[in-house]
């Protein structure tokens, strides 16, 4: 194996996921710090949803090395199911509520039944994904080695079993629904709100349109990265392009950091 052939899988499957996950853990910590100051304006649900969404997304990203380094099947499946459950059941709904709350929290509070409905839908999809995933996987394979230590990942796309291939289509549809469409819809709502932000609200929160634009761009980055990876498999039969997730997550983290760091109102400058 060449030097690049050794380091590239380690970078893509170990280093980049840990960096991406750490970025979202840091974002969650900052959201928790600013929650008492900003929740009065935008609603506590907005920042609580963002906090837990970032925590579980950071968990999803950072545990990719655990999935591949723990051992052969069924360990990659077990870790993958835990990761996917939290991404589909908590991250997707949490970020959806956070973005909608950020866009409209100053005027329309998210009602408890709406939170319950969004999370119930996400948890239903997450549970369905995990159950189908058990029957879709075709064991595990060695994807690279660190010295003599093998890194295993599940055989999903390469599974020759016809039933497994059919079940992969259901997994794809669940993933497209949540988090891809869920996040894409949230980003569209946030961007539309930024472009049509009422003048009367601008006078109070004049930084809000910029915050919403940065948040929507970050959310688009990740949802489109997942969509691209899915289409590469669906139309190009190019499997296992997980690196696109982490590239999209890094870009999303940069834009979300820009959004969160902006105050609701620009500083008043004395002329």
Image (tube, helix red, strand yellow):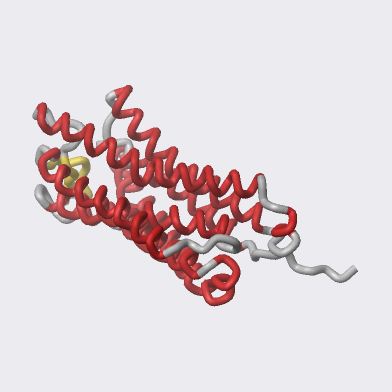
* Residue 136 image offset from top left, x and y in percent: 14, 38
Task: Say which of 223 and 74 sits in front.
Answer: 223
Task: Say which of 46 and 85 sits in front.
Answer: 46
**Can residue 21 be seen at all in this image of the molecule?**
no
Q: Quadrant of the C terminus?
A: bottom right
Q: Which residue lies furthest to the right in this view?
A: 271
Residue at x 51% of width, y 54% of height: 100
Residue at x 33% of width, y 44% of height: 7
* Residue 205 image offset from top left, x and y in percent: 69, 62
* Residue 3 image offset from top left, x and y in percent: 32, 40
Q: In which quarter of the image is the N terminus?
A: top left
* Residue 224 image offset from top left, x and y in percent: 44, 38
Q: Looking at the image, how many numbered discs can be counted on the residues?
A: 0
Q: Is residue 74 left or right of residue 221?
A: left
Q: In this view, does 262 lie to the left or right of 237?
A: right
In the figure, residue 54 lies in which quadrant?
A: bottom left
Residue at x 34% of width, y 45% of height: 178
In the figure, residue 200 lies in which quadrant?
A: bottom right
């Amino acid at each position: 194996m060449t030097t690049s052939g050794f380091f590239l899988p380690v970078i893509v499957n170990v280093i980049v996921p840990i960096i991406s996950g750490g970025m979202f853990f840091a974002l969650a910590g900052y959201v928790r710090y600013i929650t008492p100051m900003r929740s009065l304006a935008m609603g506590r649900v907005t920042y609580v949803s963002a906090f837990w969404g970032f925590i579980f997304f950071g968990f999803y990203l950072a545990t990719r090395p655990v999935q591949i380094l723990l051992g052969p099947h069924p360990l990659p499946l077990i870790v993958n199911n835990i990761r996917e459950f939290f991404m589909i059941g908590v991250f997707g709904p949490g970020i959806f509520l956070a973005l909608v709350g950020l866009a409209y929290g100053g005027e329309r509070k998210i009602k408890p039944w709406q939170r319950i409905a969004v999370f119930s839908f996400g948890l239903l999809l997450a549970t369905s994904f995990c159950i189908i995933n058990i029957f879709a996987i075709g064991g595990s394979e060695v994807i690279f080695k660190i010295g003599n230590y093998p890194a295993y990942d599940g055989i999903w796309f390469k599974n020759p079993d016809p039933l497994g291939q059919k079940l992969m289509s259901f997994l794809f549809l669940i993933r497209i629904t949540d988090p891809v469409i869920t996040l894409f819809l949230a980003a569209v709502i946030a961007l539309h709100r930024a472009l049509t932000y009422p003048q009367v609200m601008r006078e109070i929160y004049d930084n809000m349109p910029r915050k919403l634009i940065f948040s929507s761009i970050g959310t688009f980055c990740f949802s489109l990265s997942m969509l691209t990876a899915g289409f590469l498999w669906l139309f190009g039969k190019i499997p296992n392009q997980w690196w696109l997730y982490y590239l999209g997550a890094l870009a999303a983290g940069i834009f979300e950091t820009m959004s969160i760091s902006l105050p609701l109102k620009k500083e008043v400058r004395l002329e």
